[in-house]
Amino acid sequence: MGVSPGIVGIIQAAEAIKVILGIGSPLVGRMLYVDLLAMRFEAFSVPKDPNCPDCGSVGP
Ligand SMILES: [Zn+2]
């Protein structure tokens, strides 16, 4: 669906504004699943992986 990037882009812009202003509950440690065909939005918790070079304690 051609409108998908627009919808997700607006959500990302709202998240950026929340982080910059320090308001609300931004999607930190969570992932948003968007199903536009069923018009369903679900947020899943995504814990950090301690062995991950990007988000874990092990650096590159
Ligand atoms: Zn990671």
Image (cartoon, rainbow, N blue to C red):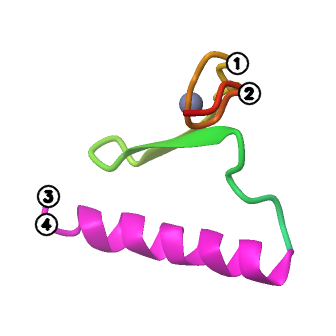
In space, the residues marked 1 and 2 are separated at their CA atoms by: 6 Å
What residue sits right under mark 1 in the picture? 50
- Taking the image in four quarters, ligand 1 sits in the one at top right
The mark closer to the camera, 2 or 3, is 2
Q: Quadrant of the N terminus?
A: bottom left
Q: Is residue 40 above or below residue 53?
A: below
Say which element carries label 1.
loop
* Foreground residue among 42 and 46: 46
The residue carrying mark 3 has its beta carbon less than 8 Å from ligand 1: no
53 horizontally vs 30: left or right: left
Say which element carries label 2.
loop
Q: Position of residue 33 (x, y in %)?
A: 47, 40
On residue 1, the disc is 3
What residue sits right under mark 2 in the picture? 57
The residue carrying mark 2 has its beta carbon less than 8 Å from ligand 1: no
Instruction: Choose the circle earlier in sequence order: 2 or 3.
Output: 3
Residue at horizontal 56 percent and vertical 29 percent from the top: 53
Q: Quadrant of the C terminus?
A: top right
Instruction: Choose the circle earlier in sequence order: 4 or 2.
Output: 4
In space, the residues marked 4 and 2 are separated at their CA atoms by: 39 Å
In space, the residues marked 3 and 1 are separated at their CA atoms by: 37 Å
